[in-house]
Amino acid sequence: MFVERVRRPGTIWNLSIVGVYVVLAEPLPPVDTRVLMTFSLPGERPLIACLGRVRWLNAPSIFKGCGSAKPSLPPGCGVEFVELDEVSRRRIAALIPR
């Protein structure tokens, strides 16, 4: 993920057709920050590239490895897809159980 032209490695923890939850080290980008994301889907080589927007933060809590807003998740942020091409959207949708 690129935040303000700086590469920030992260791990996708949850994926949907509307966005992703990304586990990130601090500092977390502020809400409404636009980010450029590239990632691959399980078992696929072609990368998905999209523009996203940080919608919510899960800052670290006092308990190691837990987020303060959602303790069941590690610290990170929820990113909404802002620009995602239709082919990529279909690839993601094919992975989501109905």
Image: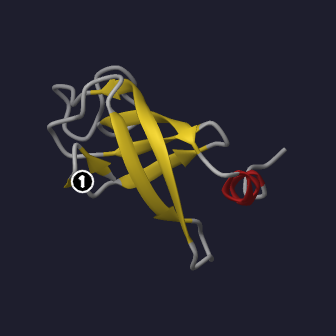
Residue 46's spot in the image, x, y percent? 58, 75
Tell me the residue at 16%/26% (across/down): 62
Q: Nearer the viewer, residue 51 or 78?
A: 51
Residue 74's spot in the image, x, y percent? 33, 40
Quadrant of the image for the C terminus? top right
Residue 81's spot in the image, x, y percent? 54, 39
Q: Is residue 93 above or below residue 47?
A: above
User: For the residue marked with disc 1, what is the amino acid?
Assistant: Arg
Tell me the residue at 74%/50% (across/down): 96
Task: Give the colouring mode of the picture.
Answer: secondary structure
Q: Is residue 65 left or right of residue 57?
A: left
Q: Is residue 72 left or right of residue 15?
A: left
Q: Is residue 4 left or right of residue 19?
A: left
Tell me the residue at 34%/53% (across/down): 1
Q: Is residue 41 above or below residue 25?
A: below
Tell me the residue at 28%/22% (across/down): 68
**For the residue carrying disc 1, how many other residues have a C-alpha within 10 Å: few (<14), some (14-19), or many (20+)?**
some
Q: Nearer the viewer, residue 39 or 3?
A: 3
Q: Nearer the viewer, residue 29 or 23?
A: 29
* Residue for badge 1: 8
Q: Is residue 67 above or below residue 1?
A: above
Based on the displayed image, in which of its 4 quarters is residue 3 positioned?
top left
Where disc 1 sits, the SS reads: loop
Residue 15's spot in the image, x, y percent? 58, 46
Based on the displayed image, in which of its 4 quarters is residue 59 positioned?
top left
